Image (spheres, rainbow, N blue to C red):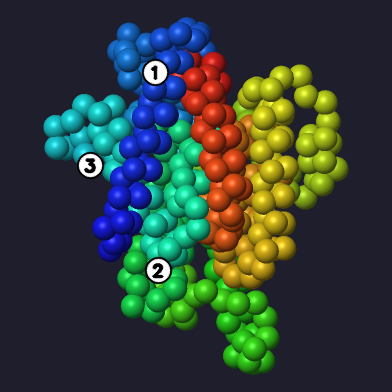
Amino acid sequence: MPSRAGWRRILTVFAVSKVIAVVALFAGFWFNFFPFNSWNYVAYTLDAAGFQLPFINWDGQWYLRIAVLGYEPPPSLTVVFYPLLPALIASVMRLGLEPINAGLVVVTLFSATALLTLERLLPREERGPSSLWLLASYPTAFYLSTLYNEALFLTAFFGLLWSLRDARRAPWALLCAAALPLTRGQGLWLAAPLVAAWLVLQLRRVRPGAGASLAAEPASLASATVGYALGAAVYFAYFGAAFGNPLIGVQMAPEMGTGTRLANLFDLPRFLGMLFGPTDRLLDVRQSAFDKTMMLLSFLALLFAVARGVRDPFLLTAWACLAVLPAMMGEGTSYGRYSLLAWACFVPAVGPSLGAPAKWTLILAGFAAQAWLAYQFGGNRWVG
């Protein structure tokens, strides 16, 4: 467990980041609210949700609908959303909490455990401010305070990185790896970093001293592999049993209207045209200047990490998947939010080596951008 100083860091970052996000979300709702976008209200209307609406906008409504009604036949857009978060909300509802409150309890808990698991990855003594601030201040980190699955995913992801470092943590590696493909689509990409880690491990056995550094113990890596296989199997088996098609969620993803398709990965000219083409608005559902900017920053952050000497094959492959694949698969929709997961690789890999001036610059600029984005989100005007 963290030291006393570690707990103080976690609690301080948690409290400050919550205040900034919650105040900005409420301010957007009170002073900037846009009453339309009726397709957003799939579980709660404005009158039903009241002042809690800023915390359940957009995807949050879908997760609440699934938590209350399950995946309703015939298959609808609910199948696009992954089952672990609504299952946890439904479990907390059994304690007597109303769905919105149950969801906020789950998200708040996992936003705290995300910081806790990240703290375990950071050095005890770090120059300048803790890298916990780098995560909390990211422009789209306010999603850790809304009814989205970012907090759950980051808890499992940081927990997996931590458990891979020690063979004694193999059970945690299995649990965290199993949770990722049940939380969101990016969790299914965990196959790639697992394969990369095994290949490097095999290379080092054949040629000792060759290959990249491997921050993973074989026993924990094996447990993570089994956990991933179990999590993916449960996901596909559930939808196969419920709808007769284990791929129904993946196949219906384009129905969300985001332009996200697996085939786009193989159309590089389309991606480059989208990335460097003209942009009409700073914030938009597709091809916004904000999303394109976050793509470029995510790519540069990955290159910066390689230049700084990061060589862990698992982390770098996971980072590439989280930064590059969502950018290439879609048309910029929600990339600003997706980039939070890529940034979660940057924070433990590079954050501790940054000097205090660089950290404070990132933290202050990040919180300023976050407050403005949360203000737009809380006003029902933008979804990242």
The percent position of residue 175, horizontal first and vertical second, equals 35, 63
Element assignment for label 3:
helix
Q: Which mark is residue 163?
A: 2
Q: CA distance from mark 1 to mark 3?
A: 27 Å
Residue 175, can we see it? Answer: yes
In this rendering, is residue 384 above or below 85? above
Query: What element does badge 2 sit on?
Result: helix
Which residue is depicted at the point 64% across and 23% down? 283
Q: Residues within 10 Å of mark 3 (few under 14, many from 20)?
A: some
Which badge, 1 or 2, comes first in the chain's sequence?
A: 1
- Vertical relation: 43 (above or below) 348: above
> Residue at 65% across / 22% down in the picture?
284
Mark 1 and mark 2: Cα distance apart in space: 37 Å
Tell me the tag on residue 91: 3
Q: Dot 2: within a 10 Å radius of its alpha carbon, few (fewer than 14), some, or many (20 or more) residues?
A: many
Name the residue: 36% across, 29% down.
19
Amino acid type shown at disc 2: Ser
Mark 3: amino acid: Ser
Q: As drawn, which residue projects farthest toward the left?
A: 96
In the displayed structure image, the side of residue 66 where residue 202 appears, left or right:
right
User: Marks 2 and 3: in contact by CB < 8 Å?
Assistant: no
> Hey, what amino acid is under mark 1?
Phe
Task: Specify whether 66 is left or right of 143.
Answer: left
Residue 127, disc: none
Q: Secondary structure at mark 1?
A: helix
Report which residue position mark 1 lands on: 26
